[in-house]
Image: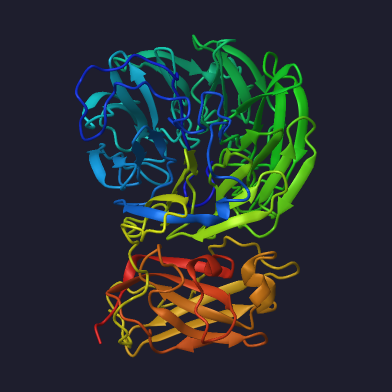
Amino acid sequence: MRGIVGGLLAVAFLTAACAGDDREPTAAGSNAAPIDACDWPLWGYSVERTFATTCATALAPDTVGDLERVWFHATDDVVTATPAVVGDTVYTGDWAGVVYALDRETGDERWRFQTTEHRNVYAGQIVSSPAVADVGDERLVFIGAGKTMYALDALDGAERWRHELGEAGNGLEPTEIESSPVVVGDLVIVGYDVHNTPGYRAGLMAFDTATGDLEWDVDLDRAGGQVEEPTGCVDVWSSPSVDEERGLVFAGTGNCPSSPQGWGGYTEALFAVDLEGTPVWSYQPHEPNNDDLDFAGAPNLFRIGDRDVVGLGNKDGTYYVVDRDTGEPVWQAEATEPGLEAEGSNFSTGGFIGGTAVSDGIVAGGTGVGPCPCAHGIDAATGEILWQNEEPAATYASAAVANGVLFLGGNDFTLRAFDLATGEILWSEEMQGAVSGGAVVSGDDLFGVAGIREPGLDERSETSGVYRFSLGTGTEPTGTTPSTTAADEAAVTALGPRGLPCTDAPCPIDFEINEPPPGTRPALFVQLVADPLAIEVTGSDLGAPEDWVRQGSAAARAGATRFGVFLSARDDDPFGGGGLICSWAEGEDGCTGTAIPRYAASYNRLSVLAIVDETTEPTLSDGADRLVRTLSFDPPLRAVEP
């Protein structure tokens, strides 16, 4: 089962030097040059998924602080897919199902391709990251969208083939490709999942890169001893890695809500199959459980001395390393604890979800919503925790490393650069949304993505997109991100009564990201009156406002004296939009607001934050560290224009 927002996953690779193309250069560049070893053509950089480049770059611990934004390209919706950067082109996809090719230098759009919508997805249409590979005399972009794998011409976005999983045209099927593909030889390999739904196959499959024909589909239920109906207990939303010399493919599987029934030998497992799809081994660190302890991310292939190993973090907060040939344990490191809603609840939001990077003898990455610190550096040889940093928030983004610098984004709307050896933060940039996709380093450039909206809501993000940063350009950035502050300051004093929720009885405000302070049992409710407007929020057993601010964050240094109620018009401005409605101090039981300070046609979210005071409005990153509880309205509240 997935963790919260954002998205999560990622993608794949190809071989470095392939045949060129004798076509003339086009707007998307020429295929004459093979994919370079210093390109970043897939999620994780290479088929070994190290998420680290050894290529020359001016980015270094002593220079990275000079990074500046060069351009921003706004997408149609949230981006959680990590870009692929090959030559002069940047490729990615968004939750609206659009695949983009962008000019690396300017950020201008070269082409776009609209995939076919599949309604039954967890978050967005595209969470799979692209893999770029040369196939014959063509350069192709492979990407999953909904329940379909696509191969597109990298030059113009023309569709070469598509392969839809399950029953053709059935939009209700739970089948989805959240995994990111990897290309090896004439195979493109990817995982697929069914959201833990019994009766539907999940697993790992391989397609012919040139035709899209299915070459093999591993039945992990049968391999694990479950020979009846598919169990929903072998989802593969992790992304496969490949040891080409051994001919082995590695990936991880998800949880089993029906456990112990349905639990098999490949449930919650790090496993290996050969390049013909035959299962080889399975490593399972857990007994049957109902704690949602998936293996997500992508296995890292690396060496300890003369021993080849594979490592992968789990949602239990532990990073596991096993022998590549046998799956025998080598070491494990507990970086944090799982973000369990309750033991046995089949819902966890924490632990390792995004990809970890391996470089210079260190495994580094972030963990999801749960106990922090959420940024970790681990000795790759022994499993010793080398460093942890409390300032970053939880994250579902993958890590990236270049020249001793670790890049990692987070749920606090911030992309950061760390010293890989020490964990010291060297640079940070506030983004226009949560950073749930990974960063990419190519040459002296850093590419990142950002965006946010709650899965299941139809309103698209208006501030999501792709960023390019570079060292000290001295030029004004292009493609300025849209403002998240409402321009019209007229106050709203009435809401449309039709369909207004929370009128007959109070609604609980119960969606949480940050853990409540120890010893508290918080309860928050809101009740609405349409005209004249009244927004009444009551709270009990909250404790002190300052105890809600995330420990170790910049917000914690500023403190908090009150609880504030905010309305927002969009998820990409979750703490602003309508502004502060009302506030209360510790010892009081809530507040009532009779006006919304800033007009918007509608408001989709109410949030309670621990605030410095009534005059200091939180920024995007600051607000994420101050969040107490939030409630979405679908359909949104409709304002009566003042």
Image-quadrant location for residue 588: bottom right
Residue in the image at 70% along x and 14% along y? 326
Asked if residue 48 is positioned above or below residue 481 in the image, the reply reads above
Residue 415: x and y, percent? 52, 54
Left of 390 or right of it: where is 448?
left
Asked if residue 519 is positioned above or below residue 128 in the image, the reply reads below
Residue in the image at 30% along x and 13% along y? 136
Residue 160: x and y, percent? 24, 23
Q: Can residue 542 be seen in this view?
A: no
Left of 95 or right of it: where is 630?
right
Residue in the image at 74% along x and 67% along y? 518
**Colour setup of the view:** rainbow
Asked if residue 445 is positioned above or below residue 44 in the image, the reply reads below
Residue 438: x and y, percent? 50, 43
Left of 17 or right of it: where is 351?
right
Judging depth in this view, the residue of 107 and 345 nearest the camera is: 107
Residue 369: x and y, percent? 61, 53
Residue in the image at 57% along x and 60% along y? 513
Image-quadrant location for residue 487: bottom left
Judging depth in this view, the residue of 407 and 129 nearest the camera is: 407
